[in-house]
Amino acid sequence: MQNQQAQVATAEVGEGRELAKGNAGQQTRVRTQCRAALSRALDRVRQAAKDRGKRLTALWHHVYTMDRLREAYYRLNHDAAPGVDGQTWAAYGEQLDTNLRKLSDRLQRGAYQAPPVERVYIPKADGRQRPIGKPTLEDKIVQRATVEVLNAVYEPEFLGCSYGARPGRSPHHALDAVTVGIEKRNINWVLDADIRGFYDAIDHEGLVKFVEPRIGDQRVVRHMRTWLKAGVLEDGQWRQQVAGTPPGGSARPLLANLYLHYVFDLWAAQWRRRYARGDVMIVRYCEDVIVGFQHKDDAKQFLSDLRERCHRFHLELHPDKTRLIEFGRWASARRQRRGQGKPATFDFSALRTSVVKRGRASLRCGARRLPNGSARSCSGSSPHSKAREVSEGAVCTEEYVQTAVFSSWTPAPQRGKRPWGA
């Protein structure tokens, strides 16, 4: 009965008609019931994931359930451009249950193969071309369903300093964290770091090695490999992608976050606890990193170690966008006494950050000042006890990752006391 109701509603959408009042209510109730069942299933995954040292070996069946795939389909952008198969959202929905049933069967049997991503270019404001990817509709469905399941595993493990591409977090939250760290902590220097071409430089084997200590279901790992190796189709020619995450899909932000979680977040939190002499604030939004320091020598040493750390994982800090800036509540007065002019500004998550008078750091989005009471900073001595518990607790409970991953894959440190490139 529910399938018939869904088919009627899908047909009405495909024909460009409004849902009838009765069908709209029925469809809402059906989807609400499905969401509740899916949420309960993920609650079981979250419960199992609480044991941080346990490998999760039964995850893939959560991905290929009909309800999960249907929910992923409805969450897609209805007007997105089709991929190499030419399949649009509306056309696929004309026989939604039949299509999803076939897709579910292929996923269950291991017969699904990720197709290549069509790559096109759009002009940027500076005259250059920005490449974008157009995955097929079914691949976007599978990626979104997989991301929902993996979020249940990894979301509690991500540190509080990570804000990009995470449920319930936005650039505004990251900016709030920077505001609190600069205004409440003794921050005198800010490292504005940007990783050059990050999404296209992620090492495939390294990413898989980061995932395997936690994800024991080889079906999930195998499909992750197929996304990484699917390649791109450009001007009708297939090209293998030797590095980087699949462009245009839902899996790309999560895989990128996973990579930086192990390459940067855990390492930076460990560096702060072991080597920093003063206050240190860490905020990361995707590949954009803001690290605040009380002492200049801490900032210089961290930048040097970060360059080495990135090099070991096939990454590179952007030479023009990575800067060490004198910043904070007293930066203007200090620079004025030295006759050096106003402090520099920096862009973080597409938001301009600057220093103003009266000893306060003004962080603005447009013309509206953002609130600084809701931030969850990764500062080592945050004024918010809840934020401190989140960041420090996550680091302490993920020591198994440092043992399982860093000791077995990361090259041995070349300097005596600093572990794994710290």
Image: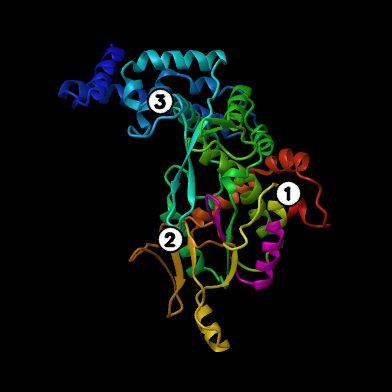
Q: Is residue 194 magenta?
A: no
Q: Is residue 288 magenta?
A: yes
Q: Amino acid at mark 1?
A: Arg
Seen at 45% across and 59% down, the residue is 175
Crowd band around label 3 with a 10 angstrom C-alpha radius: few (<14), some (14–19), many (20+): few
Q: Secondary structure at mark 3?
A: loop
Q: Please tell me whether residue 329 is drawn above or below residue 123 in the rendered image.
A: below
Q: Is residue 164 visible?
A: no
- Tell me the quarter of the image containing the N terminus: top left
**Marks 2 and 3, Cα distance to the nearest angstrom?**
37 Å
**Marks 3 and 1, Cα distance to the nearest angstrom?**
40 Å
Q: Which residue is mark 2?
A: 351
150 vs 172, left or right, is right
**Marks 1 and 2, Cα distance to the nearest angstrom?**
30 Å
Seen at 61% across and 50% down, the residue is 265
Q: Which residue is mark 1?
A: 312
Tell me the quarter of the picture where residue 189 sits.
Answer: bottom right
Q: Is residue 314 visible?
A: yes
In the current view of this chain or complex, which residue is farthest to the left? 21
Specify the segment rendered in magenta.
280-307
